[in-house]
Image (tube, rainbow, N blue to C red):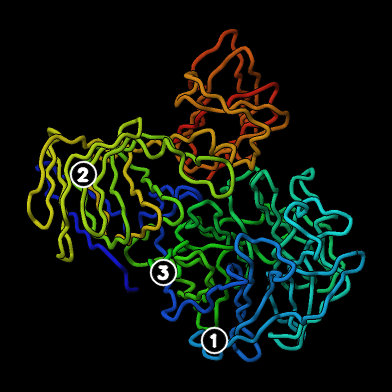
Amino acid sequence: MLKILSLIALCAIPVAAEMQATLDYANPAQREAWLRHPVYGDASFDAFIHHPKNPVHRGKAPHEWPVNGSLFEDPVSLDWFLFVGHYRTGYRRDEQNPSRATVYRSRDKGAHWEDLGPVFPAEEHTFQGEQSPQWYAPDVTVTYADDRYHMSYDWATKSSTWDNAANPSADSNSGSAYAWAHRPQGPYHRIAHPIATTREQPLLEGKYKRIYASTILQRENDWLVLTLTDSGPNFGWAYLGMTAKAPEGPYSDPELLLYPERPGFHPPLMEFHPSFIHHGFIYAPATSVALNRNFQMLWRVPIEDAMNPDAWSIHQHGSIWHAAPVEHESYGIWGQTFSGFVDADGIFNVMYPSRDSHGNGTINTASRPWDTPYRKQGVFISAHEGPSFLRLNRGGTLQEIAVTAEVHGTVTLAWNIKSPVGPNRPTSNASLHPLMLTDYAGVQLNEKAWTLLTVNARGETQTIAQGDLGNSRPITCALSWNENEEARLNVHGDVVWSGPLPGNTAALGVLAAPFSNAYFEKFAVTGKSAPAQTTYLHTEALLGAAQTMAHWKEIKSKDFRYGIGVVSSAPHVQAKWNVIGATATLWAPRGPDYGTAGIYLDGVLLSKVNFHAPAPEASQPLYTIPDLGNIPHAITLQNPEGAIPIDTLDVVH
């Protein structure tokens, strides 16, 4: 196991006279019991082993952020090639030091790497129809076919700035392009015309414009380019596809394939690039661009059906990746996402970008057996620039908790969680809404001390007891309840506190402070189990639909359940919750200024919801959807007639 500045915490609680069910939530069989989310965090059971010689590359001035890349196995030599995208800090545009791509080679399956230098020659290249030369080209992917190495890459002109990135001027542009070479390391020959440009390809009524980060793949009768696009101030990321008879084009018009506004389940803030092929399927990894970047997804589609949006499915929803508690992975996966291939031995080899403790980018590698995505036992939970708060979808009455954990930083075992969930804002770098950090009880553990505490609905913390952990390792901590809700806490086998303490779980979970990491070998809970309820705030609905706040007005009023909500201020808006549960109930206030909206389940209209009333009415249940089956669903409000308020959605698991 990787070396960890760790706390080994063993919580073992005596069993009361009445035997009750015990579930170990650190067992992969219970992975669907965790509420995983792009903003709140991920409980991962993944089996990846991070290479002990990481990082392969560490950023330094003037390219402090090498935070994108792709990994390619040459089918001819079987050498590995790692293409690294280099940026300035903050992705800033710099004519003197433009973002660029370089290539590394390994002749021994990643044990050693040699830097082969830039991918493209130094001389300028100007595309047909452009006034300004290609200047920025950081992100590349390569495939081999017909005795050539085919590359797709993103680019921006010298005159391109972030101010005109989504709305290019006459002399600025960006997009996706093609190049080829006789060797995987190049030199690569750029052709005269691009695959697609930002100026020419607005999608979804102009919402998605900027095109970047492409993957090129050969199919049976044509070539496919999958390209990332974003919606600027709406903070939605989408994957689009284009095809051509030849790799150099001309390519068909782009078509949206995966995007948050689609009718089905699609968690927000997921940024793609690059994709790979295995056994007839295209796999598209995606990483959350929330503040705490520790959530990943893996989509897939039969390669010949890739241009059919309905053919895409979720292969893994979270529980794909863990960040090791090492200095060069301080920010989790940071950049695009992981990238890789499955070799002849069935090993899934990947590169992944991160950032070190100084904020500079790092490029790293890891591997696992493709057919063994999960560990036999144990779950990882981490927090990076923002905190994580992972919940279980079971509640009830606690009798015992038993955990064995390695901890770096500060984590809290929380129960009796009654707060709602939601992002603090519907944008990239979203973090936990302040309300999420209220209304729970917990045992906080760090590398020096334990603290027993409660946090009320106003976010005020009361410390019940605390003490030093000393130098003994492993550290044992025992907390138990009797039938009168009296609790007892043991540390190192000694009773250090006893007294009244609520044991009604409401919901159970783990809170990780920023830049903290925990590995639970065991997380066993005994008690009278019952379904938990998750209450989603209005911010979740806006983030899920990639909605800009320019179309909504935030309202602070006691008519909303938690004193805050939003009301639409523009036509054709929508709200969307991506949920997994058994039932869902929509809450909202009603009043004379509100109209109606359709409520949809996975794109199918269920009913009209009437938010209108002659006089203001406090938030109340307006519509319940039963029998959701605890599988992924999208619940959407759209096509409003007049203004509509968005409050909360209750999901019972």
Residue 152 seen in render: yes
Q: Residue furthest top?
A: 614
- Residue 90 position in % (x across, y down): 61, 59
- Residue 396 visible somewhere in the drawing: no
The amino acid sitting under disc 2 is Leu
Lower position in the chain sequence, tag 2 or tag 3: 3
Q: What residue is drawn where x is 14% and y is 34%?
A: 500
At 47% across and 71% down in the image, what residue appears?
371
Q: Which residue is mark 3?
A: 327
Residue 616 drawn above or below residue 47: above
> With respect to residue 486, does 190 lie above or below?
below
Residue under label 2:
452
Q: Of the residues tagged 2 and 3, which is closer to the observer?
A: 3
Q: Is residue 517 left or right of residue 293?
A: left
Q: Where, quadrant-wise, is the N terminus in this rendering? A: bottom left
- First reached walking from the N terminus: tag 3 or tag 1: 1
The answer to which of 445 and 79 lies nearer the viewer is 445
Q: Would you identify the image quadrant in which residue 136 lies?
A: bottom right
